[in-house]
Image (spheres, rainbow, N blue to C red):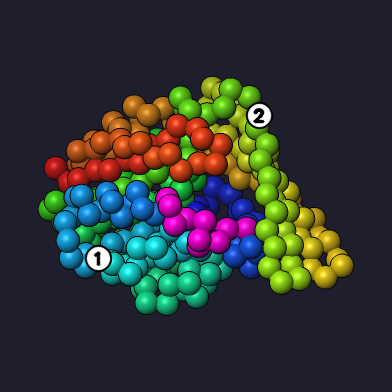
């Protein structure tokens, strides 16, 4: 997940040490197959070099590094530390996906659900420009928003899960809602109940994320110099419709 200066989300800073309990690499295995398939479809065989922007803890990327060389960027140093431990062979950089420039190009640029933290069309334009700046001819750009305006639930929703590791236990509850349907953002409120031994600690965190119609995504990616297609992406536990956006440099 990306971390951008619109907000200081606790999960990517002082609570980042809980990430490996909140989200495990094995949870991404099936999802990563869609990314691998798209990369192979567009790039063909070989050990291509990919750049992931907003890598977060590196879980999705960890399923690709066996076949691809990788470089990773994230705004949160603490989340990068999680990715470095998981992906020690990856070159990691601190940077904002809207502005970072690494001074080289790659075969593909990936942005997983970190793209959700882009809150305006200007944020998206700047991020797509970053992707384009890091791609040569025939380069590939892939991203996957969790939600589109058309797929977002009509009312508030709640989800939860419990993860355990040795004597640690984490109950994670998310309340997702849209305070103002007229704007381009929604809010997630997280409650984290962390038990270590007999002690239980309760933490709250709030995340504001972007919400745009499918056509906005497609038109802005096209505007950035790509030919884009949307592919079925049935990876979410609640079964809601989702798309993997796969684009190639025009």
Q: Residue furthest front?
A: 30
Q: Residue furthest right?
A: 198
Callout 1 crowding tier (Cα within 10 Å): few <14, some 14–19, many ≥20: some
> Residue at left 57%, top 58%?
23
Determine contact: label 2, label 1, CB under 8 Å. Answer: no
**Does residue 28 show up magenta in the picture?**
yes
Image position of 7 (left or right of 32):
right
Looking at the picture, does residue 81 appear above or below residue 224?
below
> Residue at left 17%, top 61%?
45
- Quadrant of the drawing holding the C terminus: top left
Image position of 79 (left or right of 221):
right
- Lower position in the chain sequence, tag 2 or tag 1: 1
Callout 2 crowding tier (Cα within 10 Å): few <14, some 14–19, many ≥20: few
Q: Secondary structure at mark 2?
A: loop
Looking at the picture, does residue 8 appear above or below residue 198?
above
**Does residue 228 show up magenta in the picture?**
no
Looking at the picture, does residue 8 appear above or below residue 65?
above
Image position of 211 (left or right of 225):
right
> Residue at left 39%, top 63%?
63
Q: Position of residue 238 (x, y in %)?
A: 56, 37
Q: Position of residue 188 (x, y in %)?
A: 63, 41
* Residue at which label 1 appears: 49
* Residue at which label 2 appears: 156
Which residues lie in the magenta part? 22-31
> Residue at left 52%, top 72%?
81
Give residue 44's quadrant in the image.
bottom left
Numbered badge on residue 153: none
Q: CA distance from mark 2 to mark 1?
A: 40 Å
Residue 13 makes an appearance in the image: no
User: Which of the two residues, 127 or 144, is positioned nearer the viewer here?
Assistant: 144
């Amino acid at each position: 997940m990306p971390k951008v200066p619109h907000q200081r989300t606790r999960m990517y800073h002082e609570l980042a040490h809980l990430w490996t309990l909140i989200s495990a690499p094995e949870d991404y295995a099936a999802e990563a197959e869609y990314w691998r398939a798209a990369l192979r479809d567009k790039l063909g065989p070989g050990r291509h070099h990919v750049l992931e922007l907003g890598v977060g803890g590196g879980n999705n990327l960890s399923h690709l590094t066996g076949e691809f060389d990788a470089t990773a960027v994230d705004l949160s140093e603490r989340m990068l530390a999680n990715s470095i431990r998981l992906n020690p062979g990856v070159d990691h950089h601190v940077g904002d996906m809207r502005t970072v420039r690494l001074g080289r190009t790659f075969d593909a640029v990936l942005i997983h659900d970190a793209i959700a933290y882009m809150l305006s069309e200007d944020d998206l334009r700047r991020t797509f420009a970053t992707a384009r700046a890091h791609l040569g001819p025939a380069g590939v750009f892939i991203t996957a928003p969790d939600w589109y305006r058309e797929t977002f639930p009509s009312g508030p929703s709640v989800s939860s899960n419990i993860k355990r590791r040795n004597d640690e236990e984490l109950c994670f509850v998310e309340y997702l809602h849209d305070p103002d349907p007229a704007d381009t953002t929604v809010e997630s409120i997280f409650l984290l109940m962390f038990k270590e031994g007999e002690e239980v600690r309760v933490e709250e965190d709030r995340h504001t994320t972007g919400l745009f119609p499918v056509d906005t995504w497609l038109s802005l990616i096209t505007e950035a110099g790509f030919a884009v297609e949307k592919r079925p992406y049935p990876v979410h536990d609640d079964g809601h419709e989702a798309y993997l956006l796969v684009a190639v440099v025009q």
